Amino acid sequence: MLAVVVFAGCKNGDQKKADAAPNAVLQATKDVHTLSNADSVDMQHLDLDIAVDMDKKRINGSALWTINNKDKVSVLKLDTYDLTIDSVQVDGKKVAYSLDKQIQYLGSALHIPITANSGAVKIYYHTGDSARALQWLDPQQTHDKKHPFLYTQSESIYARSWIPCADGPGIRFSYSARVKVPKGLLALMSAENPQEKNDSSIYHFNMELPIPAYLMALAVGDIAFKPVDERTGVYAEQGVVEKAHWELEGIGDMVNTAEQLYGPYRWGRYDVLVLPPGFPIGGMENPRLTFCTPTILAGDRSLVSLIAHELAHSWSGNLVTNATWDDFWLNEGFTDYFERRITERMLGKSYVDMLWELGYQDLVEEVNGLAKTPKDTWLKLDLKGRDPDAGLTDIPYEKGSHFLELIERTVGRDSFDHFLAKYFDAHAFKTITTEAFLAYLDSNLIHGDTSILNKIQINKWVYGPGIPANCPRADRERFAKVDSERMKFLNDVPATKLATSEWTTHEWLQFLRTMPPALSAAQMGKLDAAFSFTNTGNSEIADLWFVMSVRAGYTRAYGAMDNFLSSVGRRKFLEPPYGEMMKTAKNAPLAKQLYAKYRKNYHPLAQEGLDKLMKVN
């Protein structure tokens, strides 16, 4: 059993260092995705000293762990994945060590002999060619095409591929780092960050608040910074930073809005790094420095709700963390809900109703896609013996957020808001399981009220498949108008006559999503002539349009689709068009041709899924 490590929060909610040692055990649970014995040895602090070699595509250096051998065990076990261990010291003395045989998904356990009083373990190592957390970009793979770039993606269990560590979401530690990079490049981490390059090319970082390994992050490149206000700003490549700053200039207001909802932001600064195109996901909530995809830079600020999501993780996920990946909905369901509350305050109820409805559509599609494995549609997952990324579906996000929306509607918004603020404060810098949350929910909100329990039906949501019958639905005021315009088009009203001038991205998505399964090429041409979908700069709309184009045989869009697949690395936007092409013998050769040409642009995590889809050996 891995005892979930619990830390004291910061005094008065400020930035003072949280206690390095656990002050209590919230509950005991088994984390099946770490090979470490962090239940017996407290991993208190990491001092990282590394050099980034862009030419060899390798990280070299040392990881010095301050530990407390509370159970007086004779061996420290750490997680590694494709790391070469050069040597190990315990309390300054070189010791023998061993690496277990690699286990699928999990990597190899590193065994280090320690004594009852050991306090410091230092591992000298370098990364391998198969480090799943690392994407090394040649200059041509960046926006500016002048300098190489490196970024990490440590979630879910990939920190172990660039740092020997206890890699589980229930294991928190503080860290400091010294990072040497090639001349002319800037290094950033999930910590206190520089805002400009220095002459030494050596950068120092400090994260005094305890975080789990999956929130360890590093980026190195020709990066510029532009402030938004006194505690927020935007990093990006030199050629992108102005555009990114304009798109994201509302992030300071987002932070203020989030604080008004659920209490103080406890991480100091909140900055955003817009990465090169190969980033495989929308965003990653690395503390103090959200990593995000450039696909949100639509030119009209219509896709920045993604930043509201990553910001919300500063409470749900980073502050209060799921104890294991089986409890992933405690991170993502809460964050989706929080994101929509932020958006509602900033843009109004009718706007956020569209997000809720599109999310419900995604949930329906996901549940249908998981029909053969219905247990994967439970909120409480069972990922034993599996890659934890198997749980990265829309279930924890959308089913989780709709569950919380149901609770809000049942008990009232004011009561639920008070409960959530109390929950975040009471569990700050701690981890929690599904079962512990449900107990806290009952003790602090429901109080055993059978009428409330009967209305919510918790077990059907948490330990049951599919979408419960009491799932809340959003008002469809704006989408009803969209549906009316769609029907006009299908009844041969010219596309130019449709009332679309005030539509946002979300109305357009509803318009296209709900079209018949296969429009004719002629119908596609009429829509394109009126709205220039083929040449849109909005990635959400473009991706859906290209899927529809393949389905309809609308070849005029294929050139733009080629360019799109060459310049986008987000899995969400890659799998649908490739998948649609692979459905037919006519289009499969084109899919394979494009994938062979652009595969190297994609992150290793994206490649894994696409290799299966494209039947690449």
Image (spheres, rainbow, N blue to C red):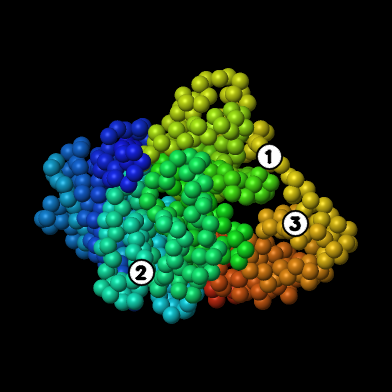
391 and 17: which is toward the camera: 17
Distance of mark 3 from mark 1, alpha carbons?
Answer: 19 Å
Give the class, few, some or many, for how many residues have Cα within 10 Å of label 3's Cα (few <14, many ≥20): some
Q: What amino acid type is highlighted by mark number 3?
A: Phe
**Residue positioned 67% across, 69% down in the render:** 536
| Residue labelled with disc 1 | 473
| Disc 2 versus disc 3: nearer the observer | 2
| Residue labelled with disc 2 | 196
**Residue positioned 82% across, 61% down in the render:** 498
When asked about the image quadrant of residue 499, the answer is: bottom right
Point out the tag, 2 or 1, that comes first from the N-terminus: 2
Give the class, few, some or many, for how many residues have Cα within 10 Å of label 2's Cα (few <14, many ≥20): few
**Residue positioned 73% across, 45% down in the render:** 476
Secondary element at image label 1: loop
441 and 299: which is toward the camera: 299
Give the class, few, some or many, for how many residues have Cα within 10 Å of label 1's Cα (few <14, many ≥20): few
Q: In this view, which residue lies farthest toward the left?
A: 93
Distance of mark 2 from mark 1, alpha carbons?
Answer: 47 Å
Q: In this view, which residue lies farthest toward the front?
A: 230
Secondary element at image label 2: loop
Q: Of the numbered discs in the image, which one, if any, rests on residue 575?
A: none
Q: Is residue 384 left or right of residue 491?
A: left
| Residue labelled with disc 3 | 511
Q: In this view, which residue lies farthest toward the bottom?
A: 146
Can residue 125 be seen in the rendering of this structure? no
Q: What amino acid type is highlighted by mark number 2?
A: Glu
Q: Is residue 511 left or right of residue 132?
A: right
Distance of mark 2 from mark 3, alpha carbons?
Answer: 44 Å
The x, y position of residue 52, in whole percent, is 31, 69
